[in-house]
Image (tube, rainbow, N blue to C red):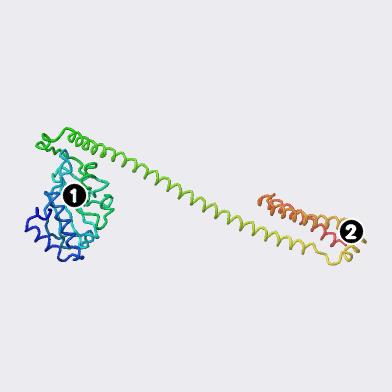
Amino acid sequence: MAMAAVGAGTVELVDAALAPYAHPDLRWLVRQHVFAVLHDFPSLSPSVDTYTSDRGESTVLLNARGLLAVSPALPPLLLTLWLPREYPFRPPLIYVFPTAPPASLVPDHPFVDHRTGRVRRTLPYLDDWRVPGSSLTGLVRSLVGALRMCHPLTSFGFVDVTTSKARPEDTTLVDVLAARLHRDRAAFRGLVDQDIHGMSSVQDSLRARANAMGRAVRELEDERMRLERAVTASLIHRDQLRSWLRQASHVTDAEAVLEPLAAAGDAPRWLESKASELAVDDAVDALGHALENGALSFQEYIRRVKILAREQFFHCYAASTALSNR
């Protein structure tokens, strides 16, 4: 029945346009889809034009173009359906544009890209395109229902007076409600954009704080590594100091030293100095263990070692003086 309502010239145009299509065995299905949408939407008419993709590739494709009435209370849209060479396995390319110059497409529309006018895959019927269940007529009807709830134009003043007089009252109320919903949606979208902008600013601030905290943690880690290296170096220096003190206070034969000292009467003074010197060694060992166990800070350890080293130096000097006076 759809083909009977289509003129012979249209049939010849469609058949000629489908000759280079990729699936010749399914041309009858494509013809049926095209004639059905032309029958259900008489404002559309077929043509063959050059389609240029976003990548700059040009292809001669069959298309249907015309005015699409979404609702009597809303302005019509200029609709273009492009059938790619892989149709019906690849869904058609749909574009909508305003018909009046004052009107423009709404930015961030859920279904229409305001920069190109292309209908996005967010349209449920387009996203769920299946063969052979999907058709051009079903797609256009789904598009009309979606755009009636969310019109893609920013401003319009179109009113169909002739149809509004004959239209039932309930239909008029629905159309007026759809127009108000469209305006409310635009206002709500502005508030959402403001919230998104505010949240983006907060996100940038949090990201900057996270970067600052990351740098602080890295600096603290580097400082910890430097302190560990300093403690290791101090422990090595401590061992070297203890070895030097042992070598300086070492006596190979105590009796050979004490005999002449006893004869000279300096043995008690030498023994006292030597005992004090060895006591300093023990004190240094105790400080080293306290430093390793964390009971003593590194600064306090160095301060006490300096005091003990000075004291041990005087004891060594006193012992050497007793040896020189024998």
Whole-percent x and y of residue 77?
16, 46
Left or right: 42 as drawn, with respect to 234: left
Whole-percent x and y of residue 91?
23, 57
- Residue 83 image-quadrant placement: bottom left
Of marks 2 and 1, which one's residue comes earlier in the chain?
1
**Residue drawn at (34%, 43%) of the image:** 196
Q: Which residue is mark 1?
A: 96
**Three-letter code, disc 1:** Val
Left or right: 168 as drawn, with respect to 301: left
- Residue 88 image-quadrant placement: bottom left
Q: Residues within 10 Å of mark 1 (few under 14, many from 20)?
A: many
Q: Which mark is residue 290?
A: none
- The answer to whether 181 is drawn above or below residue 137 in the figure is above
Quarter the C terminus occupies: bottom right
**Three-letter code, disc 2:** Ala
Q: CA distance from mark 2 to mark 1?
A: 115 Å
What kind of element bears circle 2? helix
What kind of element bears circle 1? strand
Q: Residue furthest front?
A: 1
**Residue drawn at (52%, 51%) of the image:** 217
Q: Nearer the viewer, residue 204 or 278?
A: 204
Q: Nearer the viewer, residue 14 or 82?
A: 14
Q: Which residue is mark 2?
A: 267
Mark 2 against mark 1, which lies toward the viewer?
Answer: 1
